[in-house]
Amino acid sequence: MDLDRNFLRGRAKATPLNPIRSLLIGRPLATADAPHQTIGKVVGLAVFASDALSSTAYSTQEMLVVLAAAGAAGLLYITPLTLGIIVLLGILTLSYEQTIHAYPDGGGAYIVARDNLGELSAQVAGAALLTDYILTVAVSISSGVANFVSAVPVLYPYRVLIAITFVLLVMQINLRGVKEAGIIFAFPTYFFVVMMYLTIGVGMFRLLTGTLGTVIDPPEIEMLHGLQGVTAFLILRAFANGTTALTGVEAISNGITAFKEPRSKNAGKTLVWMSVILGSLLLGTAFLAYSIGAVPSQFETVFSQLVRTVFNSRGVIYLAALSATTVILIMAANTAFADFPRLGALVAGDGFLPRQLNYRGDRLVYSRGIVALALIASALIIFFQASVTNLIPLYAIGVFLSFTLSQTGMARRWWKSGHAREGEVVQEAGSTYRYDRHWIAKMIINGLGAICTAVVMIVFAVTKFKDGAWVVIILTPLLVGTFQSIHRHYKNLASQLSLEKLPQQKRIRRNRVIMPINGVHQGTLRALQFARTLSTDITVVHISIDPLETGKVEKKWEKWGEGYRLLILDSPYRLFIEPLVEYLSKVEESLQQGDIITIVIPQFVPQRRWTGVLHARTSELLRKVLLNREEIVIVEVPYITHG
């Protein structure tokens, strides 16, 4: 009793002991440390905006890849298309600003859709976003590596290996916790922003003074489908490519809980900062890229051409700008690593993904979700050989689908708040709402956002269907079907385990203990002592493979077996599990109401772990065979050796 009192709630002091893990990801954090792991606006921008900001390094190139098919006439459209993307960015920013304040506990599109559009819409949003986060890691790191090998072309054959190395590095940093990852990534984020503004500023100055010029020795131009005229379809395809710059806008709404209080206010300001920076960088990059005659190429990025033309060299500033771009593109994966585990935990908490994803690791992050994301993204990088152009068609459909569902859900929320009684507070699963006299204006903003993002999603699906978008269009419903299957399993399990309709429990009347042994030694006798505490009905079983060895076992048991019966089962084919299972089946047939069988297994536990491979794990083999037999219990009795 005194020992039990020492471990009353709040007094246990046990901490995880794993020196290697502590070295890699830091010392374990207690649950009580969670409030101290939140982040402010400056660090929050580095954590949640790196995906969106990094897209300025490749979105212009991806538009040019399409427009180049129409020659010089097509390239004229790069600036107008960028302006259209910025208008869409403004609409999304207004929309998500409302979402952040309406849903201060985060969850973004998944929670909004669940509360306002129903469970199925929530699963679609969840599947779309999870897919997009995986692609974010693959695209951003592949793009970062593309910039890296632009500066060091000799490394081009090793781009896949380099990309996977970066994925694992970002994974390891994120396993250290949101706050620490944000601090690590803050300096590179702001260094990138400074280098981008420096490049654009110097470029605009040189353009206005007539000293900018065009790209010297441009790389071989890359065209996807040969020369063609300027058509509406071509323009729409280019616009769809450019809208990949907007992926990541929703990230802050998903991760509101990572911010310090007042978290909605801090998250909202961070969203506005991100949008202003993103819009200005997109416009400046696109305008200058057209002005210098940059061409899309896998061998040298448009941004690389822009920087070396603006600064008229491949010197220190060029290397600094390319390094900053490479780092921010790799860091863009951090946004996915911050949001994928949170969203996975929400979906798992609702029973649509494995419950393990809802587990917080040593550093108060959803570590299993982080590892899962790294593994899946690495597989994609290998499959697509780290090619941004090949990955882009799969990208953005999912996020624009989630945009559409989120904005539609918010529009419905404002409609509900406009029809609520004044003073009434309505509680929903993800938030509360009350009458809002500005509901019409807010509903129009979100409704406009829903229409715009739905149009972009359809354009993207149609124009990119043949290039690979069909994969995501098929994958999303398959994921939703998987969610539903997992949910049915958990519901069925919960129903069977429920205490509300508790069936009459079968009382255990008799426990028949069966103890398989290979030989007679101290471990055997220790297991026998334990077996005696369970029952007096004990049968020791030896599988006879070698008659000489069996004779030795019989003699030893006669001396040390304390009179308990020893059953010898002949095994002419030198099998162990099969004869034992056959015997257990016969015993099981003879059981009466209230009888159970307990299998007690003496189990060696070597002090040196590496020697464990030298011993058979009999209990594990038996569990695989007997796991679905309700009347059989398997117990291991450890015997620790010191050799």
Image (spheres, grey):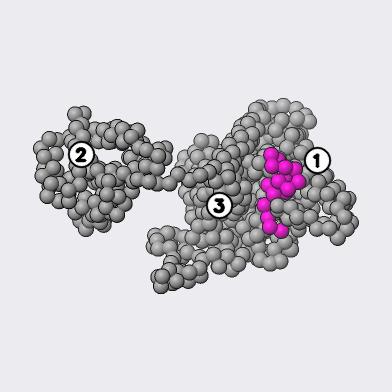
Q: Which mark is residue 358?
A: 3
**Residue span colored magenta:** 103-121
Q: Which mark is residue 451?
A: 1
Q: Position of residue 449 (x, y in %)?
A: 79, 45
Residue at image x 53%, y 43%?
Answer: 503
Amino acid on which the number 3 mark rests in the picture? Asn
Is label 1 in a helix, a strand or a loop? helix
Question: Mark 3 against mark 2, which lies toward the viewer?
Answer: 2
Is label 3 in a helix, a strand or a loop? helix
Q: Which mark is residue 567?
A: 2
Q: Nearer the viewer, residue 165 or 307?
A: 165
Question: Mark 3 against mark 1, which lies toward the viewer?
Answer: 3
- Of the image marks 3 and 2, the number of the one nearer the N terminus: 3
Q: Nearer the viewer, residue 634 or 275?
A: 634
Question: What is the crowding at mark 3: few (fewer than 14 residues within 10 Å), some, or many (at least 20)?
Answer: many
Q: Is residue 360 visible?
A: yes
Left or right of residue 247, residue 341 in this image: left
